[in-house]
Image (spheres, rainbow, N blue to C red):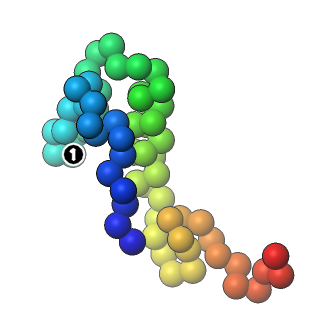
Amino acid sequence: MPRKRPEFTNSSYFVDEPGNWHLKPGAPKEMQVELENYLSSLENLHEDGTINGNQIDIYSTH
């Protein structure tokens, strides 16, 4: 499933270096947190029985 490109990538603070996404000094704290959360989400494993790294319990009654 393709990921939606995050909003922070449209900012003038965003630096799109291949393999080294980062923000320029002075970027708003909220944007810094958004980038950190996005980059850490890329580390989630996509294995059988998971969606975006979340284990799916097929026997759940919820």
Which residue is painted at 70% across and 79% down in the image?
57
Which residue is painted at 22% across and 26% down in the image?
12
Q: Residue furthest right?
A: 61
* SS class, disc 1: loop
Task: Indicate left or right for 53 with 21 as reference.
Answer: right
Return the residue nearer the eye: 30 or 20. Answer: 30
Task: Indicate left or right for 18 with 5 as reference.
Answer: left
Q: Is residue 37 above or below residue 33?
A: below
Number of marks present in the image shown:
1
Task: Indicate left or right for 58 with 33 as reference.
Answer: right
Query: Residue 61 appears at what percent x and percent y?
Result: 83, 81
Q: Quadrant of the C terminus?
A: bottom right
Which residue is painted at 48% across and 59% down in the image?
44
Return the residue nearer the eye: 11 or 35. Answer: 11
Which residue is painted at 33% across and 13% down in the image?
26
Query: Residue 48 appears at what percent x and percent y?
Result: 51, 81
- Quadrant of res 56: bottom right
Query: Residue 45 appears at what percent x and percent y?
Result: 47, 65
- Quadrant of res 27: top left
Query: Residue 13 appears at what percent x and percent y?
Result: 26, 25
Q: Is residue 46 above or below residue 38?
A: below
Q: Quadrant of the N terminus?
A: bottom left
Task: Indicate left or right for 25 with 16 as reference.
Answer: right
Q: Residue furthest top?
A: 26
Read off the residue under disc 1.
Answer: 19
Q: Residues within 10 Å of mark 1 (few under 14, many from 20)?
A: few
Q: Residue furthest bottom?
A: 59
Amino acid bearing label 1: Gly
